[in-house]
Image (cartoon, rainbow, N blue to C red):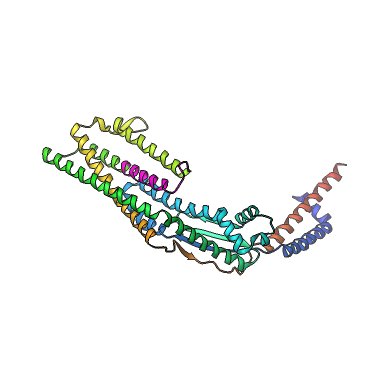
Amino acid sequence: MIPLLKAILRGKKYIIIFTVAAFVTSAGASLVIPPKYTSTTVFMPIGVEKEITGLRGFFSQLGAFGEAYSTYLRARKNYVIDFFVRSRRMSDLMNKRFDLEKVYRVNNAEEVKEELRRRTGVMIRDEGVIVLSVDDRDPTRARDMVSAYLAYLDTLLIDMNSSYAAERVRFLEGEIARRKRVVSRDDSMLAQFQKRYSLYDMQKQARAVMDLVSALSSRLSILDTEKKLLEMAMLPDVPELRSIDAEMARIEEQLAAIKNEGLDVKGRTKLFPSLNELPELSQKYVKLLSDIKMQEFAIGYLKLRLEDAKLSADKRVSVLKILDPPVVPERRSWPKRKQIVLFSTMAVFFWTAMVLLVIEEFRKSY
């Protein structure tokens, strides 16, 4: 530390000259750098709000499975919006409206898309909220571009929802009717079972098996329905469908393990026996009750989806809820002039001091 102080004192003239030069240069550069303004909006797709307040409680009946699936639904809807914002179609619409080839000084639509992607920010939060921002040298244009994004997004999402809403309504109505027939049949079989064997009292272990089988079967049934709905609007080999197939395969493996092996802890201690190890009457009773619970849960979920599908089919209403509208930014987001001047001046000061110290040590050596 002492040699450094001595070097600074001996070369203070150079340190002052270079530090002042760095201060003046960085201050001038920060004034020359074109300013950049950022306009931001916060919005939520209509329907996500209901999922947060309603579906989370609805899916809580499935425990961790239901919570994870509710989060998956919100995330999937929001990532569709992110895809639209980054799409070529959106880039072409924005280019046509704001003449971005001229604004960005580029030669073709592909370069416009890349520059627009760089200047546009999309942040998706777990709560279902989306933050959209645009950087531009003109603060008014930054605000107008964010507003245009919202308008185009709303139109694209309305068109997407309406294009296959009627088909979804028909599918969901048919699925609900089919499952109601299954519940009616199972109720009749359960009534016959109870009439024949009176009030059958299951063991606690059998009830545990039934609850777990019902939860897994409900999850599997809902995933199957979601897969069919996605197949109406997507190509066969998209990542979303592959993800659902993988999740369904995992659940089927768990159900098979419960049926044949039971559930154990780290492969050693069984929490309860396999379904095949239960008495024959318990097996029949567990199967009937778990099927009824699964179908009733699925019907409740399908009715929620049917309500949304009918709303999309009957009305062309806005699908975006604006929580924080875009405004003309009053302060620039870049350059941060104080930080540029401060860090540049400090860096030159310390580098000059280190160079003087090296020179001093070099002189002593020779």
Majority secondary structure in the magenta region: helix
Q: Is residue 206 left or right of residue 1?
A: left
Query: Which residue is nearer to you in this view: 268 or 39?
Result: 39
Q: Which residues are magenta?
A: 216-238
Q: Is residue 194 left or right of residue 171?
A: left
Residue 136 pos. (x, y %): 63, 63
Identity of the residue drawn at 35% across and 36% down: 252
Identity of the residue drawn at 25% across and 30% down: 276
Query: Which residue is nearer to you in this view: 256 or 160?
Result: 160
The quadrant where residue 249 appears? top left
Identity of the residue drawn at 52% across and 59% down: 131
Residue 263 visible (yes or no): no
User: Is 77 a magenta residue?
Assistant: no
Query: Which residue is nearer to you in this view: 165 or 319?
Result: 165
Residue 112 visible (yes or no): yes
- Residue at the right extreme, as displayed: 366
Q: Is residue 257 left or right of residue 204?
A: right
Query: Which residue is nearer to you in this view: 312 or 40?
Result: 312
User: Is 227 a magenta residue?
Assistant: yes
Residue 88 pos. (x, y %): 57, 53
Residue 144 pos. (x, y %): 58, 66
Identity of the residue drawn at 19% across and 32% down: 280
Is 132 situated above or below 182? below
Residue 29 pos. (x, y %): 75, 62
The quadrant where residue 242 appears? top left
Question: Where does the C terminus fall, quadrant-wise?
Answer: top right
